[in-house]
Amino acid sequence: MAVTVNIYYSGVNGNARKFAEEMISAGIVSDIRAEDGNLKYEYFLPIEDKETVLLIDCWKDQHSLDIHHSSPMMERIIELREKYDLHMKVECYISDETGISETNKSFIKE
């Protein structure tokens, strides 16, 4: 079962966005995307909150996420979070493998 973690990074003076930009420019994001089991690692900017960045981080299973969390990559991420003095709100979701229900599909335009 896939594990999706939504992390809301918040700071001041645009620090959350600077953090995400440095994660990308330093090659950390591409390194994470290349890790075995990573399905998605993508930043989004909430329209109504200029001081927050949303990271959607998805892994094929908890084991893959655990390996990522124990890797030296996490030290680099923590250093950048501290550099930009960011606070986090985290949500975690486990997929049910059934996908989108037929009822919900009627609301989706592809």
Image: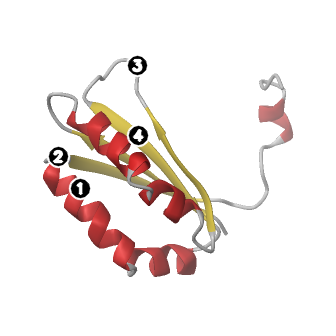
Q: Which residue is mark 1?
A: 80
Disc 1 versus disc 2: distance between alpha carbons? 6 Å
Give the SS element for disc 1: helix
**Inter-mark Cα distance, 3 to 1:** 23 Å
* 81 relative position to 25: left or right: left
Nearer the observer: mark 1 or 4; the answer is 1
In the rendered view, would you say 92 is above or below 70?
above
Specify the label residue 47 is tagged with: 3
Which comes sooner in the sequence, label 2 or label 3? 3
* Residue 67: image location, x then y, percent: 48, 81
The amino acid pointed to by label 4 is: Leu
Whether the residues at callouts 1 and 2 have beta carbons within 8 Å, the answer is yes
Determine crowd level at label 3: few under 14, some 14-19, many 20+ residues with C-alpha closer than 10 A.
few
> Of label 3 and label 1, which has the lower sequence position?
3
Q: Secondary structure at mark 2?
A: loop
**Whole-number angstrom distance, CA of label 4 to CA of label 3:** 11 Å
Q: Please give the residue where the numbered disc 2 appears in the rendered image.
A: 84
Residue at 38%, 54% in the rendered image: 26
